[in-house]
Image (cartoon, rainbow, N blue to C red):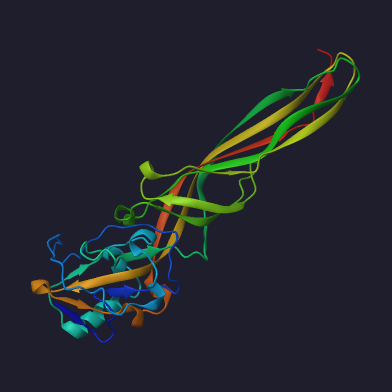
Amino acid sequence: MFRFGPFSVLAYVSILLVTSRCPSALPVAGGTDSLTVFTDDVPPSSDISHHPYPTRFEGLNLASELPSIWRRDTSTMPGWDKIAAYAKEQWGDRKHKVVTNDKHFPQFPALLCAPTTETVAVKYTGQPQCMTNNASSQGVLSGTSGSVSISVGQGYTVSSSFVLSSTTSAELFGSFTTMTTFPDITTVMQGFTTSATISNTQSDSLTQTYNTMQTSTLVMVSETGQECVATLVDRTCILTGTGVLKLVGKGFVAFEYTKKVKDFVHIDELLRDPASRTVKVTFEGPIRAKSSAAYEGACKKP
């Protein structure tokens, strides 16, 4: 049995973003609130595919293109109290379940989306552990006086692997990509902005590398019988990075009362501001930064 409030469009609370797509985000498990234990025995209800659907969702394959969240995330949104108050006003303060991602209605998920217009700042924690290594690169002699060329690599590479560290991570599955800004590391690298993939667990994490290494040539003048050597300085630092993601709620939530009666609210009419549907999660992970530089070479007889 379905009952709709004055703001209803479908059989779920609709949490809609200003934009209709969420290209980078995390799939999340279904669940219920703490009032009752959600079981999978909710029978399929009447077909709701014919109901009017918000035009901003038209043409989307929600099951494959967008992620999901569960009730705990929706209830931690700043505007959740307004949703709960509306449900109480319409249907009373009765025992109920708050259900998301009902397996019988996979086309109406609850979602968390990372805004594509924001860049996440990475912060370094603690002191970096660094070590320096000197190496030599030797040029090839022609046996007569002239110039000697030595190819050397200069620049830096940064590898990182981030996972969610907040309490919500247990309900998030998969990974998503967002733009991240890394600050300077003294004597190693300059700050930069790049995309980073953030995963739910370490076992699913991906190592990403930002590379500025370029090959340059040192040219030295040598005399007959001299060997020319360039000194290369490699400096490697290991440290931990952390950051905070803002994820915006999107999708559908159902209030289920006794005897499988569902009451539904159209949240798009209640929470128009994306800020009222935003939750924050933290991430962290190891960062390895390596720089290579070449001092001017020297030529001398062996």
Above/below status of 212 relative to 244: above
Above/below status of 277 relative to 293: below
**The image quarter in which residue 38 lies:** bottom left
Answer left or right for 185 relative to 295.
Answer: left
Q: Point out the image quarter for the N terminus.
A: bottom left
Residue 182 visible to the viewer: no
Above/below status of 236 relative to 186: above
Image coordinates for residue 165, horizontal then vertical, percent: 38, 51
Residue 144 visible to the viewer: yes
Image coordinates for residue 161, horizontal then vertical, percent: 46, 44
Q: Residue at x 15, y 59 (%)?
A: 40
Image coordinates for residue 66, horizontal then vertical, percent: 38, 62
Nearer to me, 112 or 298: 112
Above/below status of 225 relative to 97: above
Nearer to me, 187 or 197: 197
Image coordinates for residue 125, horizontal then vertical, percent: 49, 48
Q: Point out the image quarter for the C terminus.
A: top right
Q: Residue at x 23, y 84 (%)?
A: 5
